[in-house]
Image: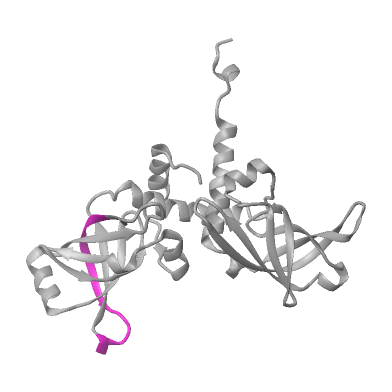
C-alpha cells in the first residue's frame, strides 16, 4: 500500500478539511473503525456514542442525552473530547486518540422516546495526522473514482505488486457457474478478464467477481455486467470479456487501492531524474 507522507497529509487537510465523510457500514469497514471503543468524554466522565459523520474540523455524533451528560455539559460549557479508535491489522492494540471539541448544537434524533440526540461537534484543534490520513484517503479515492473512472491499469507483475493483487487470477460466477479467470486490466468502473466460455452465451449476463489482495490480505467482491468480448488470437476456447461494475457494488477498499496506486504512479512520474536536477 502507498505510504502517506507529511506533505500528502498537509495537502489532505488543506483541500478536504471541511468535507464530511458519512460513516456508513462500508466506510466503517474501510476505516477499520473500532465502534465499541468510540465515546464522548467531558470532565473525566465518558458516554458511548456513534459517529454519524466526521470531517477534519468537526464531527456529528449520536448519543443518549442522559441527565449526567446534560449536567456535565453545563459545567464544562459544552467542552468535550471525542475518542476515535481504529483497528490495526498488524497490531493487537487499536490506534486511539482524543480530539478536543465544542458542542455547537444538539437536536433530537429519530424516535424521541428512545432519548437519542444528534450532537454537532466543532474541533478546537487540528486533529491528529492519523485521522487526516484516513479521511483524506477516502475522499481522494472517491474523487479519483469519478474523475478517472475509465482509466485502465494494465495488470503486469509491477502494477499487481503495487496495487496489492495476490495474483493475476480471479474467480467469476456467471449463471451460477464458477470459472477461473485472468485479469488483463482493471479500473474503477470495470475490468477485462480472460476466461473460458462461449461469448454469445455470456455477453449481457450478470457476473460476480472475487479478487484476492495482499497487504492487507482480503478478498473483495464486485458485481457487474459482461458488456462485450474480444477474441484471443489462436484460441477458440477462451476470450477476453469486459465487465462493467454496478456502481453500488464497488467496495471502498477497492477504490482506495486503485487511488493509492494512481497517486504513486503520479508521484513517480513527477520525481526529478538526475539529469533534470543537474545544472546545464
Specify the segment rendered in magenta. 97-114
- Extreme-top residue of the structure: 280
Q: Dividing the picture into quarters, in which one does residue 85 lie?
A: bottom left
| Position of residue 24 measured from the top left corner of the image (x, y, whole percent) | 43, 69
Left of 237 or right of it: where is 168?
left
154 or 57, which is in the foreground? Answer: 154
> Which one is in front, 215 or 117?
215
Name the residue at the front extreme.
Answer: 92
Q: Where does the image place residue 19, in percent across and percent down from the top left? A: 40, 57
Q: Residue at x 69, y 56 (%)?
A: 169
Color scheme of the displayed model: one colour
- Residue with the most extreme bottom position: 113
Q: Is residue 103 above or below residue 234?
A: below
Q: Nearer the viewer, residue 96 or 20?
A: 96
Q: Observer-nearest residue: 248 or 200?
A: 200
Find residue 51 and report its image quarter: bottom left
In percent of the image, x 72 and y 77: which residue is there? Answer: 176
Most common SS among magenta residues: strand
Q: Position of residue 253 (x, y in %)?
A: 52, 58
Residue located 57% across and 62% down the image: 219
Please provide percent x and percent y for residue 23: 40, 67
On screen, residue 274 versus residue 134, left or right, reads right
Magenta-span inclusion, residue 171: no
Based on the displayed image, in which of its 4 quarters is residue 203 positioned? bottom right
Q: Quadrant of the C terminus?
A: top right
What residue sits 62% from the left and 60% below the top? 211
Q: How many marks?
A: 0
Amino acid at each position: 500500500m502507498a505510504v502517506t507522507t507529511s506533505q500528502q497529509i498537509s495537502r489532505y487537510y488543506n483541500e478536504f478539511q471541511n468535507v464530511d465523510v458519512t460513516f456508513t457500514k462500508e466506510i466503517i469497514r474501510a476505516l477499520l473503525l473500532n465502534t465499541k471503543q468510540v465515546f464522548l468524554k467531558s470532565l473525566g466522565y465518558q458516554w458511548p456514542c456513534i459517529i454519524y459523520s466526521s470531517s477534519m474540523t468537526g464531527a456529528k455524533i449520536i448519543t443518549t442525552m442522559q441527565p449526567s451528560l446534560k449536567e456535565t455539559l453545563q459545567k464544562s460549557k459544552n467542552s468535550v473530547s471525542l475518542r476515535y479508535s481504529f483497528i490495526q491489522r498488524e497490531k493487537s492494540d487499536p490506534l486511539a486518540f482524543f480530539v478536543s471539541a465544542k458542542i455547537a448544537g444538539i437536536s433530537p434524533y429519530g424516535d424521541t422516546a428512545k432519548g437519542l440526540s444528534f450532537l454537532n461537534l466543532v474541533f478546537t484543534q487540528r486533529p491528529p495526522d492519523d485521522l487526516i490520513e484516513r479521511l483524506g484517503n477516502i475522499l481522494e479515492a472517491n474523487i479519483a473514482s469519478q474523475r478517472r473512472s475509465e482509466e485502465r491499469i494494465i495488470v503486469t507483475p509491477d502494477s499487481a505488486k503495487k496495487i496489492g493483487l495476490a495474483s493475476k487470477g480471479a474467480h467469476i460466477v456467471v449463471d451460477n457457474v464458477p470459472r477461473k479467470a485472468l485479469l488483463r486490466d482493471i479500473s474503477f468502473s470495470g475490468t477485462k478478464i480472460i476466461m473460458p466460455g462461449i461469448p454469445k452465451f455470456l455477453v449481457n449476463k450478470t457476473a460476480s467477481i472475487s479478487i484476492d489482495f495482499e497487504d492487507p490480505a482480503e478478498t473483495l467482491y464486485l458485481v457487474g455486467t459482461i458488456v462485450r468480448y474480444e477474441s484471443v488470437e489462436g484460441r477458440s476456447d477462451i476470450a477476453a470479456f469486459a465487465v462493467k461494475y454496478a456502481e453500488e457494488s464497488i467496495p471502498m477498499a477497492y477504490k482506495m487501492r486503485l487511488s493509492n496506486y494512481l497517486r504513486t504512479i503520479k508521484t513517480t512520474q513527477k520525481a526529478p531524474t538526475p539529469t533534470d536536477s543537474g545544472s546545464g
